[in-house]
């Protein structure tokens, strides 16, 4: 999109290029077709080059997906701050836990609008311990700055509202990620046919 002959820049931030490729690519392509300048910031993996071949600019960031030490992860704030300040996007869209928390804080520091998407809460909210309380505090503090916060399931939205992490007027419940269902189709499992004792539980 161009306003006053200036192309608007949108930066997608997630923990892996794999997740961006599989769940955000169609949205990115749609925005690109509407003349937005699209880039993505993730850990490097084998899907990074696939996204680059689609014409999206890649910005590398090191992120420990499995790290459970919020104090160690605070370095991410400064990494994101450096990236956001250099790239100067008009809008940042965060996905996954660490970009949502630390990316939001960095966006606030540089004064850039951002949107957060809560696709799932992971293991952190299952237990009630010191780590859970700390993460809830980080969520509550960092989620003050996003323009909007998208939730993909009602339970997560209700949990955030109950814990006063988000304000209702900022929160939007969306039906999903907008992926092409033809791309994700079930395959017949031969093992089920051959082995009647094989049991699958879906929930």
Image (tube, helix red, strand yellow):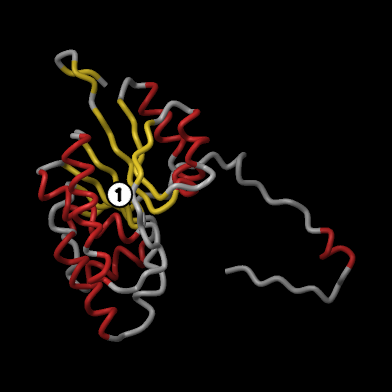
**Crowding near pointer 1: few (<14 within 10 Å), some, many (20+)?**
many
Where is mark 1, residue-wise? 94
Residue at left 24%, top 46%? Answer: 115
> Is 55 positioned to the left or the right of 186 in the image?
left
x, y (%) of residue 118? 33, 57
Residue at left 82%, top 65%? Answer: 192
Quadrant for the C terminus in the image:
bottom right
> Is 80 positioned to the left or the right of 154 in the image?
left
Quadrant for the N terminus in the image:
top left
Q: Is residue 122 above or below residue 176?
A: below
x, y (%) of residue 4? 14, 15
x, y (%) of residue 163? 21, 73
x, y (%) of residue 93? 29, 44
In the current view of this chain or complex, which residue is farthest to the right?
194
In the current view of this chain or complex, which residue is farthest to the top?
5
Tell how many labels.
1
> Is 140 positioned to the left or the right of 50 in the image?
left
Residue at left 14%, top 41%? Answer: 112
Residue at left 29%, top 67%? Answer: 158
Q: Is residue 104 above or below residue 127?
A: above
Pick the front one: 112 or 126: 112
Q: Quadrant of residue 199?
A: bottom right
Pick the front one: 40 or 63: 63
Pick the front one: 29 or 17: 17
Q: Secondary structure at mark 1?
A: strand
Q: Quadrant of residue 39?
A: top left
Q: Is residue 132 above or below residue 80?
A: below
């Amino acid at each position: 999109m161009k306003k006053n002959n200036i192309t608007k820049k949108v930066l997608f931030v997630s923990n892996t290029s794999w997740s961006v490729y599989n769940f955000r690519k169609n949205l990115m392509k749609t925005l690109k077709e509407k003349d937005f300048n699209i880039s993505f910031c993730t850990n490097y993996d084998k899907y990074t080059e696939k996204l680059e071949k689609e014409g999206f600019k890649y910005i590398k960031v090191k992120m420990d997906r499995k790290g459970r030490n919020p104090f160690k992860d605070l370095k991410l704030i400064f990494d994101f701050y450096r990236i956001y300040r250099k790239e100067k996007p008009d809008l940042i869209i965060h996905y996954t836990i660490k970009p949502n928390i630390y990316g939001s804080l960095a966006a606030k520091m540089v004064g850039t609008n951002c949107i957060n998407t809560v696709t799932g809460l992971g293991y952190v909210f299952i237990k009630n311990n010191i780590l859970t309380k700390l993460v809830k505090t980080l969520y509550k503090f960092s989620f003050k700055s996003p323009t909007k916060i998208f939730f993909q399931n009602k339970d997560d939205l209700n949990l955030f509202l109950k814990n006063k992490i988000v304000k209702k007027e900022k929160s939007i419940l969306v039906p999903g990620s907008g992926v092409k269902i033809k791309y994700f189709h079930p395959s017949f499992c031969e093992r089920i046919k051959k082995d009647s004792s094989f049991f699958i539980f879906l929930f």
